[in-house]
Amino acid sequence: MTKEFNIAEMRRLGGLSDESAALLAGMKPMLEKHAEALVTAFYTNLDQHEHLQKLLDAKEGRRQALGTHLRAWLLSLTTGSYDESYQTRRYVIGKRHVEVGLDPRWVVGAMSFCRGQIMPMIEAEYGSAPDKMDRFLALDRIMDLDLNIMLQSYDDQRMNMFLETTGFSKTLFESMIASAGD
Ligand code: HEM
């Protein structure tokens, strides 16, 4: 786990307050109700791209297992507690995507797809509620935070692979990057 990524700091920066966390915790029933439809739509959307479809079907039972993982991921957005253990779980998810050779832009695009599914759910469940926008923002922010952690994982894993292959030290590599901006 990277030392630099601090979830409390990132929550403050993105505005995921304790009030937002409480709103998220209250939205579990809504996500449970819509999870099956979202999971189906998610993989139908990925199937438009032949190489993603192949990746999903590369192992027997993978697609089905992934459906279960995605559902669990979706519901865990409403865990209400976004601390270091939450960060670690998200980091591991990011790492798995690096391991299967998926470029990060597909994860970013897929998250964008999920956001698009969330908006009509909120509209249907909380159409006239005064805190409807706060609920939407809370979900938007936690999805951003998830993406941020997953992308940090990508960055770290890829750097580690590069360091292992080249034998460079991390300090040398980071100082090269820093001096490239001079
Ligand atoms: C919002 C974006 C995404 C989320 C939240 C997500 C969620 C997950 C989760 C929770 C896992 C299980 C990780 C673990 O084993 O600990 C996983 C694995 C995986 N995901 Fe995703 N995923 C996303 C995008 C994608 C995309 C775009 C693809 C493209 C095909 C993909 C393909 C895979 C594959 C192949 C695995 C590994 C399955 C295995 O271990 O056999 N994911 N994903």
Image: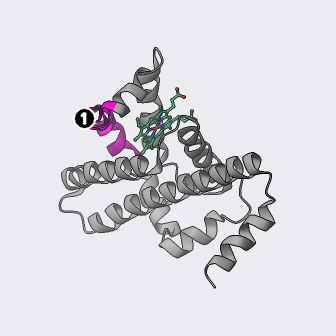
Secondary structure mostly seen in the magenta stretch:
helix
Between 63 and 10, the one lying in front of the other is 63
**Residue 170: image location, x then y, percent:** 78, 61
Between 105 and 44, the one lying in front of the other is 105
**Is residue 3 shown above or below 41?**
below
**Residue 159: image location, x then y, percent:** 67, 54
Asked whether mark 1 lies closer than 8 Å to ligand 1, one says: no
What amino acid is labelled 1 in the image?
Answer: Gln
Q: Which quadrant would residue 57 be assigned to in this image?
A: top left
Between 178 and 55, the one lying in front of the other is 178
Q: Which quadrant would residue 135 be assigned to in this image?
A: bottom left
Report the side of 161 relative to 30 (left or right). right
Q: Is residue 18 magenta?
A: no
**Is residue 94 shown above or below 59?**
below
Residue placed farthest to the bottom in the image?
182
Counting labels gives: 1
Report the side of 97 relative to 63 (left or right). right
Q: Residue at x 34, y 28 (%)?
A: 53
Q: Residue at x 60, y 43 (%)?
A: 95
SS at mark 1 in the image:
loop
Q: Residue at x 45, y 65 (%)?
A: 20
Q: Residue at x 41, y 52 (%)?
A: 105
| Residue pointed to by mark 1 | 48
Between 84 and 18, the one lying in front of the other is 84
Quadrant in which the C terminus is drawn: bottom right
Mark 1 burial class by Cα count in 10 Å: few <14, some 14-19, many 20+:
few
**Residue 115: image location, x then y, percent:** 31, 54
Bounds of the magenta segment: 27-50
Report the side of 116 relative to 32 (left or right). left
**Residue 148: image location, x then y, percent:** 52, 60
